[in-house]
Amino acid sequence: MSERETSGDGRMTELRSPLSWPGLTRLRGRSRFGAAKARASTLAPHAPNDVDGRDQPGHDGRRGRGAKRLLAFALTLVAVVALALVAYTISLGPLPLREAKAVSTTVVDRNGKLLRAYAMADGRWRLPVSAKKDIDPTYLKLLLAYEDQRFFEHYGVDPRALARAAIQLGSHGHIISGGSTITMQLARLLEPRRQRSLHAKLRQIVRALELERKLSKDEILDLYLTLAPFGGNLEGIRSASIGYFGKEPKRLSLAEAALLVALPQSPETRRLDRHPEAARRGRDRVLDRMVAENVISAEDAAQAKAQAVPALRKPMPVLAPHAADQATAVVKDQPIIRLTLDASLQKVLEPLARDRAMALGPNVSIGLIVVDNDSGDVLAHVGSADYFDEKRAGQVDMTRAVRSPGSTLKPFIYGLAFEDGFVHPESLIEDRPVRFGSYAPENFDMTFQGTVPVRKALQLSLNVPAIVLLDRVGASRLSSRLKQAGGNLVLPKDEAPGLAMGLGGVGVTLQDLAQLYAGFPRLGTTKPLREIMMDSDDAREPLRLMDAAAAWQVGNVLLGTPPPENAARNRIAFKTGTSYGYRDAWSVGFDGRVTIGVWVGRPDGAPVPGLIGRVAAAPILFDAFARSGKLPAALPKPPKGALVASNSKLPLPLRRFRPIGELVRSGAEQAPHIQFPLNGSHIDVDRSAGTEAAVMPVKVSGGVLPLTMLVNGLPVGEIDSRRQRLIDPPGPGFARLTVIDATGAADTVVVRIQ
């Protein structure tokens, strides 16, 4: 490594080779300097030093100045390089992060499960993903071990990987491995380059450093997993897992994870739907390397290799398509839209609707909706039998279509009659021919049952008793009350509410009908339906339908409705309906937890012979309850003030209902009339002296004794022979006062208590 030669003074000097090790040179210098220093110690204090000159005064200062110059040069060089990098970064322009973060619009259920995704404008599928929440740990372990082992340690560039790539390039003459980190690969995805070159690599390095400065490691990994190509129009791990395996990437087998690691390396030449064998080889190569690096065992790798590679793509999920379409039309510029639906429930009800529609005949469709009673949230929304069936007008949402409800409005007529207090579920009522001017309602089977309990009249859906009660309640009052509770009834143009609406002479949607029926288990209040979950607080206020006691009585009656064949009794309260001409079949039922509505018919409104609610719609309703996976929940207990008694225990006027036509007197007798308070008057009640002094007088004229007084539908006692009585007024608000005489004649006023 070195040679010696003789100098002019006869001393031997050492010639250091340029290839001498710096360490050895430093050692030799230190030994020679020590020897010279030892010789200098024997000389006089002012004797000249060795002619070498290294120990002359000022030598240490020159060395310090040299070190400072070297440091300054190094700092200057670093500054120049840094400025060059900054200038180069500025010349590249801003990172296209905003464009890269654009993803497919996805609609998810209340638990975050995917219902439907929409491709981007250019046809690509790119679903948002989170490594921590959405990805199987096995896949992440393989990905980092194969692509970037020091991902969480470096700052965007791994010097070891680059050195390895450089050595391979020098020894082979061409690029063997790029040495790219995941951050550098993300930079390439953000700014694609077709050719591999040193300039492209430098650009990736600069962009990787910039990404590491702007984003966290988790954000970089999430963005890479969203943009990585997997062949065709599939981008991102989530799109690939759903497109190739038909499932979310939360639970992947070892074979599936290795395959998804291999695909982005050569996405087009390893496309599963075109080159499954190349994809299999890429997967096996990943498994072999993982075995070599002791990431997985050889046994696990062998089992993974034995699994077949899928050769066909699977369709993207299309659950609740009508609800998803509506949500995307309402919510704009939001990548993830969360609905109140339950994907598991939706998944079992859509096949139910499709299979039943096929069995009912051609062109028949089905609408089905499930509503949570307490919250008013829609848990399932089946808009048609098959979204993609053009013959059945599959893309028409039949839960929003206005159709004739048949007899499904009858429970609300009975509920208002119970609220008014002139009838009770155990009261007797006549089912016999009756005429209202030119209108003579008839039962569906063209027969009459005679005298029946009101309970049975509703359970058998008898038409005449319902119309007689509606005549007493008032069609306009029924219409306004249902509208107040959120049910938008659609009447024919320029037509006022009439008695025919009790048998379906009005239009309503399945969604509105389900909202109204949910008011029964809620004991008299409804809540507007909600299908899109917003970040803001839920500000929906309950809407009044009827008194709690009346709502409970209706639910108790409907619970005893005879169920379809082979179905359990007294489990579900329900009502069926059939519109005129067999165009619509309905069935709406509820338990203590949910309300389910079913519509069956043709979307074009054509009649379907034999289409009856009890035969076509009721079995679907009971199947829907069965497929929900939960046993029917009990209905609420009777509220305070609900009168539970047999017919013989009822007050005399409630034992039998008599229509208004029977109140005409043949002699001097007159129907009862409330003289005080007047209908619509305001009554001031002084409660300052205590509740005993806070009474309200009632004065009645006419009527056959005994006279029974009811306040808000509840009996409060009889009126004396002077036809006067002091009653305890209810709390502030509107109160309905009713007087019924021994013949069933009655008079009612509504006053406001202040």
Image (cartoon, rainbow, N blue to C red):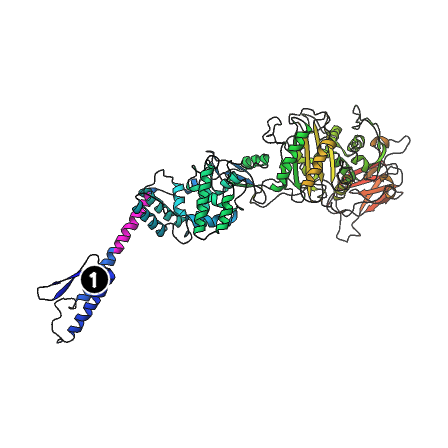
357 or 667: nearer the eye? 357
* Residue assigned mark 1: 65
Residue 322 in the image, given as x and y percentages of width and height: 59, 34
Q: Residues within 10 Å of mark 1 (few under 14, many from 20)?
A: few
149 over 519 or under it: above or below: below
Instruction: Quadrant for the C terminus, please.
Output: top right
82 over 602 or under it: above or below: below
Check residue 447 for magenta coloring. Answer: no
Residue closest to the far left: 8
727 over 749 or under it: above or below: below
Determine the main secondary structure of the stretch shown in magenta. Answer: helix
The image quadrant of residue 712 is top right
- The residue at the point 75 percent across, 34 percent down is 410
- The residue at the point 84 percent across, 44 percent down is 645
Is residue 477 visible in the rendered image? The answer is: no
670 or 79: nearer the eye? 79
Check residue 80 for magenta coloring. Answer: yes
Amino acid type, callout 1: Arg
Residue 521 in the image, given as x and y percentages of width and height: 72, 43
Instruction: Quadrant for the N terminus, please.
Output: bottom left
Residue 728 in the image, given as x and y percentages of width and height: 79, 48
Helix, strand or loop for disc 1? helix
Q: Which residues are magenta?
A: 74-91
Residue 54 in the image, given as x and y percentages of width and height: 16, 66
Horizontal side of 3 relative to 100 (left or right) equals: left
